[in-house]
Image (tube, rainbow, N blue to C red):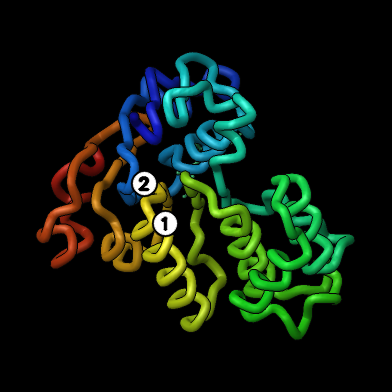
């Protein structure tokens, strides 16, 4: 069973094709680095995969079900710009809310456990509106992992994190991958992403430029990918 199947996805903003016939499969346990220059279409694609935006054409399947199915959605964990964090709630209230929505058996316990893991226990009652970008991003990490999702869709997950939080996120990702979860992440931090990645997907101006294994050449020189498959 494929963890993710992207089939002929197009997205138009007005007349502008932000995604042009994107198609690729991801098998369970793979970690895919979704790469491309600014404006290539990574955020647009991740939002579509997460069911937050509709493709103009094409389909997305998660574990062989339509990605908008309830069971598919509960298998997904997401990090993205301002996704699913409520400013007027505290960190604890946010996590409790999502733990409840995901139907976890002990929402309170799960919320506290993730506050602790992400180093937010001390500020758990602070309103998110007053959080720094780094604290918000830690909360976004906690929210994404809270329900132990089988498929993680992460848009720039390392952004705004300090070194310690980057190391924490990397170890959470490694742990999830070791447990068989699948990860797709877009990032500008090529090195962090390529170290973890088993595969790469490169998008160039809305088109798939390359999909395949993450190779040693890419690790030795992260710009290799762009030079080899990059700007047409
Ligand atoms: P970045 O790395 O800068 O976040 P990206 O690869 O994630 O870039 P997208 O944000 O997906 O790229 O944008 C792809 C293209 O679609 C860009 O040209 C962008 O200007 C355009 N675009 C994105 N969202 C919209 C929108 N809501 N309305 C119109 N155009 C949009």
- Give the residue at the far left of this rendering: 217
User: Could you tell me which quadrant the C terminus lies in?
Assistant: top left
Query: In front: 187, or 39?
Result: 187
User: Could you tell me which quadrant the N terminus lies in?
Assistant: top left
Q: Position of residue 182 (x, y in %)?
A: 39, 47
> Which image quarter: residue 41?
top left
Q: Residue at x 78, y 65 (%)?
A: 108
Indicate left or right for 215 with 40 as reference.
Answer: left
Label 1 environment density (alpha carbons within 10 Å; few <14, some 14–19, many ≥20): many
Q: Position of residue 32 (x, y in %)?
A: 33, 48
SS category of the residue bearing label 1: loop
Q: Position of residue 117 (x, y in %)?
A: 59, 76
Indicate left or right for 107 with 88 as reference.
Answer: left
Q: How many numbered marks are there?
A: 2
Q: Is mark 1 within 8 Å of ligand 1?
A: no
Compared to residue 76, the image places residue 165 above or below, namely below
Mark 1 → mark 2, Cα distance in angstroms: 7 Å
Q: Residue at x 59, y 51 (%)?
A: 80
Indicate left or right for 46 with 103 as reference.
Answer: left
Which mark is on residue 34? 2
Tell me if label 1 and label 2 are in contact, CB under 8 Å.
yes
Q: Residue at x 19, y 52 (%)?
A: 214
Residue topped by disc 1: 187
Q: Earlier in the sequence, mark 1 or mark 2?
A: 2
- Give the residue at the far front of this rendering: 105
Compared to residue 148, the image places residue 21 above or below, namely above
Q: Residue at x 54, y 31 (%)?
A: 48
Q: Position of residue 23 (x, y in %)?
A: 33, 25
């Amino acid at each position: 069973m494929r963890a993710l199947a992207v089939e002929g996805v197009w997205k138009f903003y007005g007349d502008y094709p932000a995604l042009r016939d994107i198609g690729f499969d991801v098998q369970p346990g793979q970690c895919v680095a979704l790469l491309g220059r600014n404006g290539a279409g990574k955020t647009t694609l991740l939002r579509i995969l997460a069911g937050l935006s509709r493709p103009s054409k094409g389909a997305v399947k998660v574990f062989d079900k339509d990605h908008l199915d309830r069971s598919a959605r509960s298998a997904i964990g997401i990090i993205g710009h301002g996704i699913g964090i409520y400013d007027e709630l505290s960190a604890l209230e946010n996590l409790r809310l999502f733990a409840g929505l995901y139907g976890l058996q002990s929402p309170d316990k799960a919320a506290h456990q993730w506050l602790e893991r992400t180093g937010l226990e001390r500020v758990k009652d602070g309103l998110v509106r007053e959080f720094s970008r780094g604290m918000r991003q830690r909360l976004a990490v906690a929210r994404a992992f809270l329900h132990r999702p089988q498929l993680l869709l992460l848009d720039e997950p390392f952004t705004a994190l300090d070194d310690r939080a980057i190391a924490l996120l990397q170890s959470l990702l490694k742990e999830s991958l070791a447990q068989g979860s699948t990860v797709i992440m877009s990032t500008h931090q090529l090195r962090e992403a390529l170290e973890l990645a088993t595969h790469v997907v490169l998008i160039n101006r809305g088109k798939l430029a390359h999909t395949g294994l993450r190779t040693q050449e890419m690790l030795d020189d992260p710009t290799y990918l762009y030079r080899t498959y990059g700007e047409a």
